[in-house]
Image (cartoon, rainbow, N blue to C red):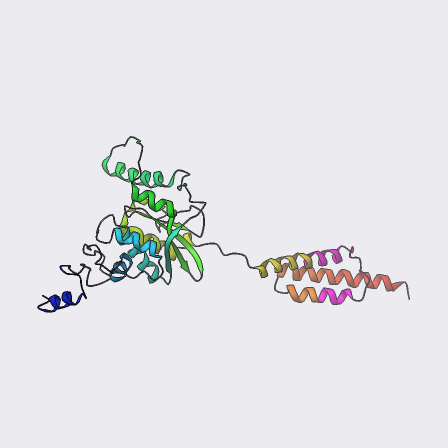
Amino acid sequence: AYGGLRPALERLGAVPAGSSPAAIPENPADPTPSPVEPPPAGQDATTQVDAVYRFAHASDDFKAWMFESLGKTEYSPFVTARAMDQAARQHGAMVEWGFFSDATLDGIGSDGDDAQTDREADEDGFCEAEMGVTFEAETVVLDSATTDNASQGNYVGKIRKEGAVAGRIDIGDDGKAMVFVGETGNQRVVYSSGETATYSDGDGDGAAMVTALLTLPQNALPPEPSPKSSSDDAQKTADRALFQSVVSGTHRDMLSPELADVLEAAFLRQQGDSELSALFERAVVSYQNAMMNATASLF
């Protein structure tokens, strides 16, 4: 196919003699990449991954892990991560890929068990339901790849939207994925059916988990109270106490002419609150009566 071009390039040392180009899909968005040969001399694993799919925000360590499964079409962390990355982009979010640690996930699954055991329990439960059998518990020995990845962190992706971490992604060496809600904690994403996601959903459902996280209200993070709202609450409490003290006649400056200005300022701050507006009107009546009673003896 190369005619006399390749021998000429080999003689010049531009390409290694006898090597063949790595097979990558023509369309980077193709969900089933062709098997990829080891990178030619001078071309590292990171470059190979970028040639197949460009993760916009990913560490080199993460890309090196992706390369290990680049040629797989089933049970592939690469296929899962790519689908989840694309789903995040479709919904105006991005994924920061790497190896991260979270104390709330460190050795803890959704039910308080070991994270690896938690994943396997999901898968066993799925198989038991499908096959109508029950598996006996057995000791699981982690392979070297799983152990190596686990030592670098216990999740591999932060889903960010509008500057906040909406969720975190865990992907096993078998391509099974999980999305946890928020920046911390072990709350799993929930589907529109109300079912909580499990690792046994399969590598193809990683994108569905990301979509559920970013589109369903049950997976939305509660808004954090702003400092302004806390300040407003404190002012509302103080103004309510002012009105009540005047209504009861216990305010220390009950007969002070300046109290009228203080009451008016509080009313202007709280005039959108119907309860405090009504309390203000009662306070004004009490203040007027107190002033009238105090001046009646002068005539």
**Residue beneath the point at 62% across and 61% down:** 274
Q: Is residue 41 left or right of residue 193?
A: left
Picture coordinates of residue 227 (x, y %)?
58, 59
- Please indicate, yes or no, whether residue 151 appears anywhere in the rendered image: yes
**Residue beneath the point at 38% across and 49% down:** 155
Residue 297 occupies quadrant: bottom right
Residue 162 occupies quadrant: bottom left
Picture coordinates of residue 245 (x, y %)?
74, 56
Q: Nearer the viewer, residue 85 or 40?
A: 40
- The quadrant of the picture occupied by the N terminus is bottom left
- Please indicate, yes or no, whether residue 215 appears anywhere in the rendered image: no
Tally of numbered tags: 0
Q: Nearer the viewer, residue 74 or 150?
A: 150
Q: Is residue 220 left or right of residue 28?
A: right
Residue 27 magenta-drawn?
Answer: no
Picture coordinates of residue 17 (x, y %)?
14, 61
Residue 247 magenta-drawn?
Answer: yes
The segment highlighted magenta reads 239-264
